[in-house]
Image: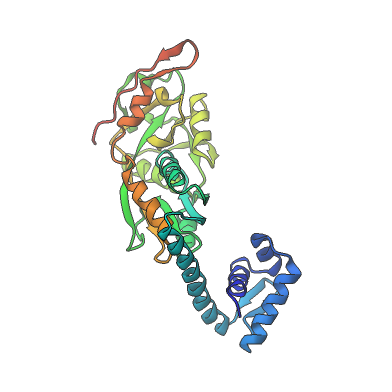
Amino acid sequence: MSLRQFEYALAVAAEGSVTAAAESLSVAQPSMSQQIRNLERDLGVTLFDRTPAGLVPTAVGRAFLQEAEIAVNAARRARETARAGADDLVGELVVAAQLGFGTRQLPGALGALRRRFPRLEVTVFEESSSAEMEQLCRRRLTDLALMAQCRRGPADAHRLGDEEFVAVLGAGHRQLAADRVDLRALEGEPWVRFDRESALDGVLEEVASDNGLRPATVARVSQTATAVRWAAHGLGVTLVPASAVPSGYEHLARPVFPAVSQPVIAVVQPDSGPAATALLELLRQETWNSSASFWSRADEPHGEGGAVNDARPLRAG
């Protein structure tokens, strides 16, 4: 038996088929099939049941896969620890980020990490759904997950700070004259919203319920940048974290009243290795609780003719 066979078995369990598992690992399908058969022969057990829905781990297969995952992660951690001792991290760091959260902070932390360890390869997955993020954490498919804190969040989560939300309005909107937009003044406005299962749409649902709003949905999108651009063109109002507002659109964003914020956490797998720990420390150094950096960008010239916007700093709610 080999660690490579363990990795193949874990991939088959995750994908539900040898073909998909082989594609995910960039391995020839016949080779992976042979390795799985060899592993089952060496163990003297059947790891997977062949069903119409795909390959499903047997009872003994599930027990084996739990130990195989521990072995694979331990081997990776040992390699990374040895390389860290030489002050040079290599290999892959897998990060999952919940859409809209840490939009500015994560790139800053990753940039610092790569400058420190230039041979480290980083893979980032963006997910909008809290359920998908929780599943990634449970299945230990990531080294670090950056996400909004939920009611049943992991007990070992590291709180980084809070993301403050702003309303983005179309050019010429009457509420742009205000320093802070009263959410109740947006009753009857069309809204650019996010996918129904996304954490961002969950925030809007809660805000609407708390403030007696009935958002009229004009469009649903999957990306914060798209929502901001569509709102800027007058399609409707949108509500996004301040750090997710792209450069050049800050003059159309306003803090809201009552203030809206969402705690942000990082979940690091216990066996993820030193690269994830280093990234966590860099994320802690980023600015989370203050929106001063956002509004300092809003004071810069923008648009044609270098017009200066009239955005004001966010105040504590």
**Vertical placement of 307 versus 143: above or below?**
above
* Front residue of this view, candidates 270 and 130: 270
Residue 175 in which image quadrant: top left
Image location of residue 127, percent across then percent down:
51, 50
Q: Is residue 187 visible?
A: no
Q: Quadrant of residue 208?
A: top left
Quarter in which the C terminus is drawn: top left
Q: Nearer the viewer, residue 120 or 257?
A: 120
Residue sitting at the far left:
316
Q: Quadrant of residue 292?
A: top left
| Residue 5 place in picture, x, y as percent | 62, 74
Query: What residue sits 43% from the left and 46% below the top?
Result: 116
Residue at the right extreme of this rendering: 30
Q: Is residue 26 visible?
A: yes
Residue 19 shown left or right of residue 275 in the figure: right
Q: Is residue 72 left or right of residue 314?
A: right
Q: Nearer the viewer, residue 293 or 2?
A: 2
- In this orientation, which residue lies closer to the viewer: 218 or 102? 102
Q: Is residue 13 left or right of residue 170?
A: right
Q: Is residue 161 above or below residue 295?
A: below
Question: What is the x, y in percent for residue 63?
Answer: 52, 81
Question: Outermost residue toward the bottom?
Answer: 44
Which quadrant, please, contains the N terminus?
A: bottom right
Colour convention of the picture: rainbow
Q: Which residue appears farthest toward the front when viewing the image?
A: 86
